[in-house]
Amino acid sequence: MGARSWTWLAGASLLTGCVPPGAPDPDYAPPPPAPSFTAQAPDRAPVALRGGQSRERDSQHRQQPQQLGDGVTAAPAPPPAWRTRPVTADARAIAPSTYVVRPGDTLRGIADRTGSGAEVIARANNLPPPFSLRAGQRLEVPGGRYHLVRPGETGIAIARAYGVDWSRIVTTNDLREPYTLRAGMRILIPGDLPGVSVAAQRAAAFNIDIDDIITGSSPAPAPGKRPEKPSTSVASRAPSPITPVQEPSRLRGAFDWPVNGQIVGRFGPGRSGERLNGINIAVPLGTSVLAAADGVVVYAGNEISSLGGLVIIKHGDNWTTVYGHCRDLLVRRGQAVKRGQAIARSGDSGNADRPQLHFELRRGRNPIDPLGQLPRS
């Protein structure tokens, strides 16, 4: 699927509460402040990478690993939420209409009354945050198929249920970071793409990528439920795959190199036209892969075939790191990790032609050249 260009609707997840006519929604909160992390870009790309393997912490990983295929083993963990909690395609179709705002109305209440989605109504009527309404105001309510999100459902599972690429659902509903669905919200399911077969569209819905995991893998929390605290080790009780896990809000410290090795693939377009969203680092088979910063694991598995064994960690301030082509996965979803902690061992899984680590750094969903954020050797 590659990188996508989306426009986000700020504050869309906070369209609740009763608002006096003409007043802003009292529950509206502005987006979080810009992150404070800055890093010095190197004058030249390093060849030898910094170490840190002495900080490896493998002693906690003693449980029997799971065989995932393609030579990949992983710490014991349940299947991801989109397979644990499949979605029933029971979207309700509504006709387009016009709604006249009454005193005390909120977008959420209007959405519930019309069967539409609050975010979709806001986008259709160009309502900026804090989403002020006034009595007598006329709102266009877009028609279409609206899916009611239930607790534990994920964007990936919803996309699979309707055979629609998750990125199109994000775009249609103007979902924004951190892309968390809420139980009780209604999302508009886009129709078939003209000129593209239904079979091809459905196949695309099942072909997930890094973007999908970052934006569509978090399960919708039940009303009034807070995310669960992350576990401290792989030996701790694993959170249910359909339970949201608390993620860091702020990045702590700076990023460090995940392995020692030779850079064999650089960020950006390649000679044959393909684009690399990170860097590839050649290392001996079984090299310890270290977390580049403190964070919480949001994915550990091998469901992206091109990358094989894969770990994804969120660090706060919208930063995410990605570690691919791994042989052994030493962590699991919902586990807190520290910078320098061993999270995997390198391999040649996926489409790797030699033992190596594929490393990505993302801000939101945008790939960032890791060499501009990592310390110089």
Image (cartoon, grey):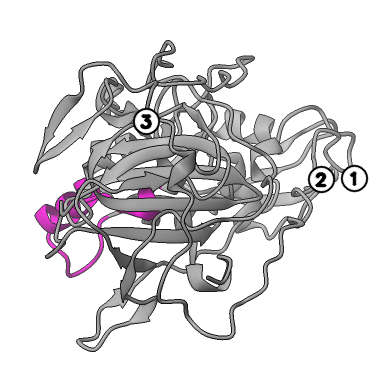
State whether residue 26 is above or below residue 53. Answer: above
On the question of residue 38 being in view, the answer is: yes
The residue at which mark 3 appears reads as 331
Question: Which residue occupies 22% across, 49% down?
Answer: 304
User: Residue 242, percent across and down?
Assistant: 40, 21
**Helix, strand or loop under label 1:** loop
> Residue 109, percent across and down?
68, 29
> At label 1, which amino acid type do we have?
Gly
Task: Say which element carries label 2.
Answer: loop
Q: Image quadrant of residue 82?
A: top left
- Residue 207 is a magenta residue: yes
Residue furthest to the top in view is 237
Task: Please tell me the numbered disc located at residue 22.
Answer: 1
- Give the residue pinned by disc 2: 133
Q: Which residues are magenta?
A: 192-213
Kindly report the distance in space between the C-alpha atoms of the residues bearing marks 2 and 3.
Answer: 47 Å
Q: Position of residue 168 (x, y in %)?
A: 38, 56
Classify residue 123 as left or right of residue 345.
Answer: right
